[in-house]
Image (cartoon, helix red, strand yellow):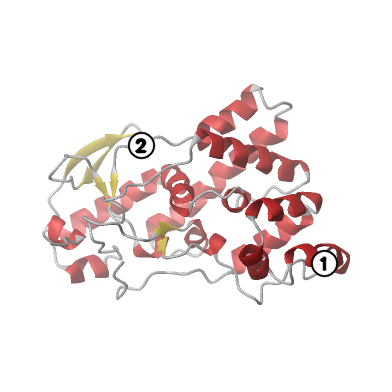
Amino acid sequence: MSTKLADLLSVSPESLERSGVFNAFVNRDSLVYIDPHALLKAKTPELQQAGHRFRRYFSGLIRLLQVSGRSDDVFYSEVLTELRTADLGFHFSHAISRGVCGMKPDMGAGVTATARKFIRAGVTEAELFPLVAVLEGVEMKRAGGMIAKIILPNLFEYTQRVVQELNIESGLFRYAGKSWQVPFHPLDSKPIILMPMELLSLKPAAYDWRQDELISEDNDLVRMMVVPQLGENWKAAFDNCFPSVIKKVMLLHPSLMNDMIRLYRAKPGNPLLPSMVV
């Protein structure tokens, strides 16, 4: 028998929907992912704050890599440590069955090395890191785990607000020097972090491109050089080329990353609807 989050928390599905919580099945895999792109245009107050945290965090990593001289210095090592995500010990309500995975050490190392190459070429936007994760072939659930770790305080704030508004049974959980009112899973007593629906997607924007998103639209010279290798648009590139090939071409023409970031910011995203049962 399938159990949904509303059943687990003894609250009506309509109440969760009004609060923007994704009412996922909790005893089977929910095929949705955390989408960092949602932080660019979020309406949920806690996610708007999370968007600021996201930018501050990655801007800090970019500054560390700007001053790093070698891949074995303290600045570089700090970035590697930050991108490594172990089991956080929480249940995220959209993924209670399968959990939220972070990046393995080799994935974090690949993202760090590639990000530093773009940073040295002058690309310093916070959105660089989730896009580099795509180029490195990091799975969507692992890239989402990286984002979850960064915005955890904001997700705790959201969870506490919803718990109090809906009078959901809860208790205190201490994290990062602060206590939060959260629900706990009845089987293992781990805290449950409620996930705003607008943060989740069936296919995050960084992994989903359209035919009208042209490659290097404003630079005819670069376009002439890369179109034979990648195609006319980013959709063709990701449909027909391995991410490693796209990465190689982009590192030869770093302006393509600025092009990709511009398009990424303008993308409408792929928000979930309450009627979606996944």
Q: Residue at x 60, y 64 (%)?
A: 265
Q: Locate the C terminus and report the quarter of the image it occupies.
A: bottom left
Q: Which residue is mark 2?
A: 87
Instruction: Note whether 179 is above or below 183 in the view shown.
Output: above
Image: 34 above or below 240: above
Classify mark 2: residues with Cα within 10 Å, few (<14), some (14-19) or many (20+).
few
Q: Is residue 140 above or below residue 61?
A: below
Q: How many badges with numbers are in the image?
A: 2
Q: Residue placed at 70% from the left, 29% from the top?
A: 68
Reading the image, the residue beneath label 1 is 223
Task: State yes or no: discs 2 and 1 in contact (Cβ < 8 Å).
Answer: no
Q: Position of residue 57 (x, y in %)?
A: 54, 42
Secondary structure beneath label 2: loop
Comparing 259 with 244, the one in front is 244
Q: Amino acid at mark 1?
A: Arg
Q: Pick the residue in front: 106 or 217.
A: 106
- N-term-proximal mark, 2 vs 1: 2
Cα distance between the residues tagged 2 and 1? 43 Å
